[in-house]
Amino acid sequence: MVDSRTPVLVGVGQVSERLDSPGYRARSPVDLAADAARAALADAGVDAPAVDTVAGVPQFEISLPWAVPLLGCSDNFPRSVAARLGATPRRAVLEVGGGQAPQHLVNEFAAEIAAGRADVVLLFGSEAISTITALAAAGSPPDFTESPGGSLESRGHGLDGIVSMHHVAHGLSDTPSQYALIENARRARLKMSRDDYAMAIGELFSPFTAVAADNPHAAAPVFRDAVSLVTPGAANRPIADPYTRYVVAREKVNQGAAVLLMSAGAARRLGVPESSWVFLAGHADLRERNLLERADYGTSPAAARAAQHALETAEISSSDLTAIDLYSCYAAPVFIVAEALGIAVNDARGLTVTGGLPFFGGPGNNYSMHAIASVVERVRSAPGSYGFVGANGGIMSKHSTGVYTTIPYAFRSSRSEQIQAELDAVPAPAEALSADGPAVIETYTVKHLRDGRREGIVLGRLEDDGRRFVARADAVLELLTEGEPIGERVTARSTADGNVIVPR
């Protein structure tokens, strides 16, 4: 008999619509999330009034302090969704931003249920960027503003250590450029040529497109081979070396997903059949060092340990997994976590159950809610199997992982706090806000702007004292686009507009 306080996932739901799809309804983010939540409740056969806690994942337009919602928004997203459902939860939570949010919420509220502080918890999120952009451009758009009232536990933006105005001033204002720094460092460590590494990205992601092509919720359900994914063209323009448009997260989507968690006691009371129960067998939540504090840009100790520790907690190995979804906003997170788990990138089990963020779609912070829903469906269809979800937020900054199975597991606390302390104890290099003198390039990228201009960005080390710095590198674009720039000796100069790199 499963203990009555054991948390179980009992319902999942996903919804989507494309602008050109039959029956397109131009749903708002609240409407998409509510429809996904209805599907999760229906999956469990549970009525909305049973829900005592709701937690929402914020859309991009409400998770950045400077963003202005084009069509307005709810000032209490979780309670707006609850109101659509006819639920009156005692607690409503708006999680911090980041792709880790859905899995972190599962981990957190599983613990809350196990401790007796919650009983029936509904988690949800959505994005309607495609619809909002189209409606705003069409003229006479609807107003999505609403104020449902009620309490809200808002957790803020969660951008500390991720967004720096100093870095933005040097061109690091977008995620492709920042992930490209990680990608190029990894390529150099592996001693791969630019062409070979680009092809490795294509070969990684081509199977993802095949999964997306069979997924009715995918934003881009089109199979593409490795060559077409990484060959620049009119529809596949360069973004930031080594990325082309096809291999970065697709944000213009209309998608929502939800997960229903409850105690085993509540599941029995509400009549949820045990065949629908899925257990959180292992989990972890860790954070990486800030970007300029990382010892090796080509890897992520926090991502690796979060993945490994979830399996350790479940007392299984990666060979026991049958359904796997690794966060795929860019190639680097997939490469790094697969390597940490000892899984080949061409493993026959596949590394995504949805199609991944560039092809299924990247619905803001909520992508992994779709991954969780899909993994739950997979393990239900194969009782006794295990599924894994790896979720990533920021610039490989925040990592939450989960292992799912129909095999009964008592809730197990992770050692995340202890592991985090070990990661934080590793010495970090100092940063030079103003950099002058001989230096060495540690990693780099070249941004390709829509108007055809290019901008070089370098992370380097001063030779005199080893301090790390960020600099614009437009004066050495030729160096950054040919051969191997990493390890090259250059000169750093500070100016009124920030640091620049010039030839030695």
Image (cartoon, rainbow, N blue to C red):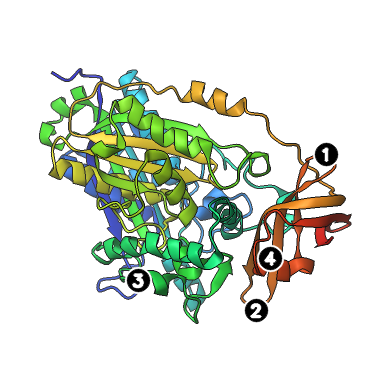
Q: Position of residue 441 (x, y in %)?
A: 72, 53
Categorize mark 4 by other alpha carbons within 10 Å: few (<14), some (14-19), many (20+). many
Q: Amino acid at mark 4?
A: Leu
Q: Around disc 1, counting alpha carbons within 10 Å, would you say few (fewer than 14), some (14 to 19), or many (20 or more)?
A: few
Q: CA distance from mark 3 to mark 4?
A: 28 Å
- Residue 316 pos. (x, y %): 28, 30
Mark 2, mark 1: which one is toward the viewer? 1
- Check if mark 1's residue and mark 4's residue have beta carbons within 8 Å: no
Q: What kind of element bears circle 3?
A: loop
- Quadrant (top left/top right/bottom left/bottom right) for the N terminus: top left
Specify whether residue 98 is in view.
yes
Disc 3 target residue:
225
Residue under label 4:
480
Residue 413: x and y in percent read 37, 21
**Pointer 2 or 1: first along the chain:** 2
Residue type at mark 3?
Asp
Disc 1 marks a residue whose amino acid type is: Asp
Mark 2 and mark 3: Cα distance apart in space? 27 Å
The residue at which mark 2 appears reads as 452
Q: Earlier in the sequence, mark 1 or mark 4?
A: 1
Q: Quadrant of residue 388?
A: top left
Tags 3 and 1 touching, CB below 8 Å: no
Q: Quadrant of residue 70?
A: bottom right
* CA–CA distance in space, label 4 to label 2: 17 Å
Image quarter where the C terminus lies is bottom right
Q: Residue at x 25, y 22 (%)?
A: 6
Residue at 56%, 68% in the rendered image? 239
Q: Mark 3 or 4 closer to N-term? A: 3
